[in-house]
Amino acid sequence: MVLGLLTFAAGFGSFGAVASLGEVARAFGHVVHGTTVAEQMGLSGSVIGLGLGVLRFASLFGLPLAVLADRWGRRSTLIWYTAIGLVCTVVAAASPSYWIFVAIFALGRPLLTASVSIAHVAGSELANSEGRAGALALITGSYGIGAGIAALVHTALSGRDGFRFVFLMAILPLCLVLFLRDRVVEPSRWHRPDHWNHAVLGHVDPAQRRRLLTVLSFTFGLSLVTGPANGYLFLYADNVVKASSTTVAIMVVASSMTGLGGLLLGRWGADRYGRKPVLALALTSLIAASLLVYAGPVPALVTGYLFSVAAAGALAPPGTALSNELFPTEVRASVAGWNIAAGVSGSIAGLLIFGVLVDRSSSFFTAACITFIPMIAILGLLLLLPETRGKEPEELWEPRAASV
């Protein structure tokens, strides 16, 4: 529960840069009643896009930050990263210009990204095999609730400078983190003397590297789908199918229920049938739902989005459980850091490929088919990994001599 509350705080702090983008552009640009996007938004699309690119690239620094949890422990890094990341969010409220706003958020984003990954590592280490998928589902769901509440606050405080009030409200989750700091437990699996001697930043023993590359390849392929599936969705809804703001609002609210349902199904299936079968089914469902999103009219958009959120929720418990169970404690946070890098890289690659295909084909659905369908092939990577259901991490490796 404490880890869930910390990821709730991180979710609130992480949200804002994209959802508040319109207000940020209007606040720092010059809105006129023209016909071009730049005139209507206040800043040009290239400037906005470059800023978003900087924020995505900054997330890569979550790798070395997460790796430090193997040396300094889960508790201290989790508390410090979450607190400092939220401080950056609060400070962003006073940004005098667009690029200073981007710079401040770029400082805080990798800290919050790393804190969420470390929370998943700590959750997997504190729980046993029967409760691990449920614990990770709780942590993942708490992050989504934090982001969702930030979205609702942003909607309620919409206006030219509304984003400043949203960012200032990050003081509340920051106070929550300070209140919980003495209640965060260091997992007994992590022992400082041993890991300080053996954990090298980003290093994974040669015997574990093939397994690591398999996991990272799967993460990259998954993010190549989720990046454009999420990144272009609201642009597609507003500018292509012309969905009303009411429809989009109802769709987003309803997705909270389907996402929760997906989390519960993923947790139940991972404990009953195994991590790998549920991962395979959830990924296939995610690809199918993402294709439906870009298939055409508003009903397809809404239906596809709701099912894609459910599929993404179902992916989380078995995916995070499998990734954490496959590796020894001494490198588990390092693996989480490498997963951050693979996820960010896959998302950026997917956005670039999808955008080029949309320009070439003038069709979102064609771009979705070419980008998403080949990623079904990454299911074959699961055959290279052992099933971890019902096993403790210590049963899947031998310290310093793990076999793949």
Image (cartoon, rainbow, N blue to C red):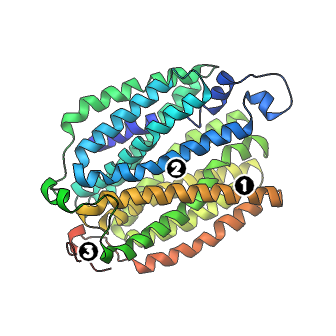
Look at the numbered disc 1 and give the secondary structure of its residue.
Answer: helix
Between 355 and 8, the one lying in front of the other is 355
Q: Badge 2 local density, few (<14 within 10 Å), some, or many (20+)?
A: many
Q: Badge 3 local density, few (<14 within 10 Å), some, or many (20+)?
A: some
Q: How many marks?
A: 3
Q: Amino acid at mark 2?
A: Thr
Q: Badge 1 local density, few (<14 within 10 Å), some, or many (20+)?
A: some
User: Residue 38 location in percent, x, y?
Assistant: 78, 32
User: Residue 64 location in percent, x, y?
Assistant: 37, 52
The residue singled out by tag 1 in the image is 355
Q: Which residue appears at 37% of the width and 71% of the height?
A: 274
C-alpha distance separating marks 1 and 3: 41 Å
The residue singled out by tag 2 in the image is 258
Marks 1/2 in contact by CB < 8 Å: the verdict is no
- State which mark lies toward you, 3 or 2: 3
Q: Which residue appears at 40% of the width and 49% of the height?
A: 140
Tell which circle, 1 or 3, labels the residue nearer the N-terminal end: 1
| Position of the C terminus by quadrant | bottom left
Q: Tell me if residue 314 can be seen.
A: no
Between 194 and 227, the one lying in front of the other is 194
Q: Residue furthest right?
A: 35
Q: Which residue appears at 37% of the width and 29% of the height?
A: 173
Q: Is residue 222 left or right of residue 126?
A: right
C-alpha distance separating marks 1 and 2: 28 Å
Marks 1/3 in contact by CB < 8 Å: the verdict is no
Tell which circle, 1 or 2, labels the residue nearer the N-terminal end: 2
| Position of the N terminus by quadrant | top left
Tell which circle, 3 or 2, labels the residue nearer the N-terminal end: 2
Which label was assigned to residue 396?
3
